[in-house]
Image (cartoon, rainbow, N blue to C red):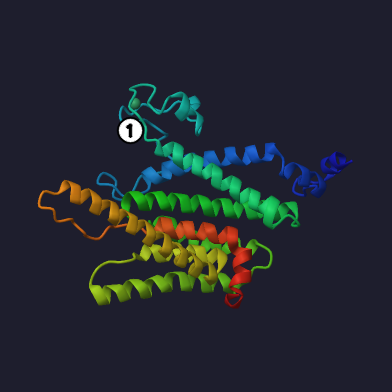
Amino acid sequence: MALQACYLAPVFELDAELWAVFSTSKTAYAFVAVLGALWGSFGNVCIYRMPPSEEFPKGRSVVAPGSHCFACGANVRWYDNVPLLSFLWLRGSCRDCKASFSPRYLLVEGAAAMLFVAAYHYIVAIAFTASSPEEQLLRFAVLATFFWLLLIITFIDFDHQLILDKLTYPFIPIFYALGLLLPNSSPTAGLVGIAVGYGVVRVISDGYWLLTHREGMGYGDGKLLAIIGALYGWQAVLVSLFLGSILGALISIVLLLLRRENSTSDSENGKPDLGRVAVPFGPFLALGAIIYVFAESELRLVLAPLW
Ligand SMILES: [Zn+2]
């Protein structure tokens, strides 16, 4: 009965009954995981090619040329370009010259697959179970894109201590527009979110500079927070900033302690080098935003005055 209804319905209108069964099936989750791994694979390309280098001050194209070995230049064959799996069957090395590839490729693909599955599960099985199939799919598409972008920004920031304008600027209006497509959205919330996200970092960063004449937060962090605010409003900005600061501080303390341990055992004059550690802030803001997304309804209860 449900099958027939689905067959007769126009393609863009999903049968709710059938969708309810299919959307939580193992097949659907497996499909989402594969989708995530494929986007993770493209994410790797962006992470390695977009940042500026000496040879390419503006970064390289993410489309052309195709994937190739960085050591011997051989093109990666299409059957060796399967996310996650080809890394395993090639044992992480080039088929031609046997140069080994960084396990980071595997990590990024796996992380993207997990984030896609988490986003999907949250939407179809936890937070929006009562929503229409179309709304669930729209929400998943927006959230998966958001997580994908956070993943790329995170790894580029780890590598280069840079949050690229060419990644943040286009996605501020894109996520503002996508936010408007979602039910119960307000046109002002995203605009306020953008202003607060960018503004709060300008205030902190410029204030820190005036007081210490040292670079603290970069404006790139503000543009990242503007993206978060464009989609989720100023509340998400503050929560991400708060969680990001705590997580970042904890990691910095651990790194400082590790460094002190190393330098006391290594240094000859016995004077530990207790300088500052440069920890990129973007990854922690991204992590804060991901936590925000999954905890939004609880946060609304706990921090009710904010809404
Ligand atoms: Zn090679």
Left or right: where 249 falls relative to 119: left
Left or right: where 220 falls relative to 125: left
Residue 211 x %, y %: 26, 77
Left or right: where 5 falls relative to 228: right
Give above or below for 280 relative to 107. Answer: below
Dot 1 amino acid type: Phe
> What residue is drawn where x is 14% and y is 49%?
267
> What residue is drawn where x is 62% and y is 42%?
32
Considering the numbered disc 1 on the image, is that residue within a helix, a strand or a loop? loop
Image quarter for ligand 1: top left
Residue 302 x %, y %: 60, 71
Ligand 1 within 8 Å of disc 1? The answer is yes
> What residue is drawn where x is 18% and y is 56%?
273
Which quadrant of the structure image shows residue 31?
Answer: top right
Give above or below for 61 relative to 176. Answer: above
Residue 303 x %, y %: 58, 73
**Residue placed under numbered mark 1 in the picture:** 70
Residue 22 x %, y %: 75, 42
Give above or below for 209 relative to 280. Answer: below
Left or right: where 58 falls relative to 130: left
> What residue is drawn where x is 33% and y is 71%?
205
Query: Considering the image in quadrants, where does the N terminus appear?
Result: top right
Query: Considering the image in quadrants, where does the C terminus appear?
Result: bottom right
User: Which residue is most to the left?
Assistant: 269
The answer to whether any part of residue 107 appears in the image is yes
The answer to which of 242 and 48 lies nearer the viewer is 242
